[in-house]
Amino acid sequence: MIGIIKEEEVEELVQKIINDYDDEKNIDAVRLYEKPDKQEVREVLQNLFQIIYPGFFRDRLYKIYNPKHNFAVIVEDCFYHLNKQVIRALDFCRLRGVMTLEDRERESYRVCKEFFAKIPEIRKILETDLEASFQGDPAAGCMEEIILAYPGLMAVTVYRIAHELYLLKIPVIPRLMTEYAHSRTGIDIHPGATIGDHFFIDHGTGIVIGETAIIGKNVKIYQGVTIGALSTRDGQKLAGVKRHPTIEDNVTIYAGASILGGDTVIGENTVIGGNTFITRSIDANTRVSMKNLEMEYRTAGNQRKTEEISQGEEWYYMI
C-alpha cells in the first residue's frame, strides 16, 4: 500500500491544511509558545501535592538528605514554573484587558506570592476534608490510605488549589487543573465553586459541581450527583449570574441525585435521597426521596411481574 502514495499529492494536502491556518479561526495555532502548557501545569500540580502532603508524593529526581532542604527546592521550583505559566495565561485575561509583557510579569509575580502565602490555609482546610473522609467512610483503613488512594480527596485537593488561583483572577490555569483531576477521577468541580470545610466525596465518579455553586460545611456527596444549572440556553449572557444551587451545612446527598438552579437552596441538616431530581428549595432538617419505585421482571416466557420498592418509612418529604 505504501508504494501507491504519490509524494506531490501528499504535499498538496499538507499545504492545503497549512493555508487553512491563515483563516483566523479561534482554533488556529496562533502564538504557539505563548500559551499555558498543559503538561507543565500538571507538573506544577504534582509539586503542589508534594508541598501540601509532604512525604506522600516524593519526586525521585531530588536527592537531598535533609527533608527541609528538599521541600525548599520543590517550593522554589514550583514557584518558578507556576509564575511562568501565569505570565502566559494573563495574556488571555478579559478581566484585565490588554497587558504588556512587563505588566504581566509584575502581576504574575504578585499573584504567585499571594497564592503561595495561602498554602498553609489550603493545608488547614484539607486537613478537615481528610478528617471528614476518614470519619465518613468505614471502609477507610487509615488516613494515609485516603491521601494515597482516594479519588475524592485528590479531586478536592486540586479544587482547593485551583479555587485560590480562580479568586486571584488567573485565567485558564485553574480550569486546566480541575479538568486534569476530572480526567483522573471522573469528578468535575469547577474552580469557581465555593465549598466549606469538612467536605467529603465518597466514591465520586460522575459528580458535577458548577461554577456558582455554594456548599457549606460538613457536606457529604456520593457518586453521580449533579449540582448544576437549570438551563444554560442563554449561553454567555449568563456569565457571572448565579445559576447553581446553594447547599447549606451538614447536608448529605446520595448517589444519582440532581439539584439544579441558582435559586435552589438545600437547607441545613437535610438528607437528599438517591436519584432525586430537585429544582426548588428544600427546607432545613428535611429528608427527601423519590416516591416508591416499581421493579419489573420478565421471565423467558415473557411473563411480567412487578414489585414496588419502598424507599423507607423515615423519608417524610416526597417529591
Image (tube, rainbow, N blue to C red):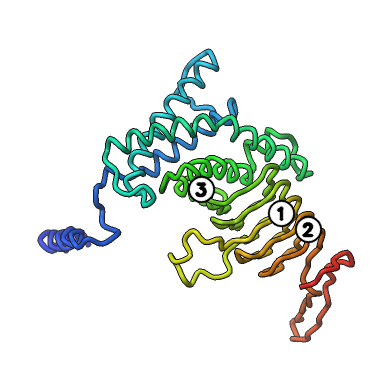
> Label 1, on which residue?
248
Discs 3/2, front: 2
Q: Is residue 177 left or right of residue 277?
A: left
x and y percentages locating residue 42 in the rendered image: 45, 40
x and y percentages locating residue 86 in the rendered image: 38, 39
Q: Residue at x 34, y 38 (%)?
A: 87
Q: Residue furthest left?
A: 8
**In this view, 205 is above or below 4:** above
> Label 2, on which residue?
270
Identify the amino acid type marked 2.
Thr
Identify the amino acid type marked 1.
Glu
Q: Please tell me how crowded label 2 is: few (under 14), some (14-19), or many (20+) other residues with Cα within 10 Å.
A: many
Q: Residue furthest right?
A: 313
Q: Please tell me how crowded label 1 is: few (under 14), some (14-19), or many (20+) other residues with Cα within 10 Å.
A: many
- Could you tell me how far apart the alpha carbons at marks 1 and 3 are, in whole angstroms? 23 Å
> Label 3, on which residue?
178
Taking depth in this image into account, of 246 and 172 the one nearest to the observer is: 246
Numbered badge on residue 286: none
Identify the amino acid type marked 3.
Thr
Q: Please tell me how crowded label 3 is: few (under 14), some (14-19), or many (20+) other residues with Cα within 10 Å.
A: many
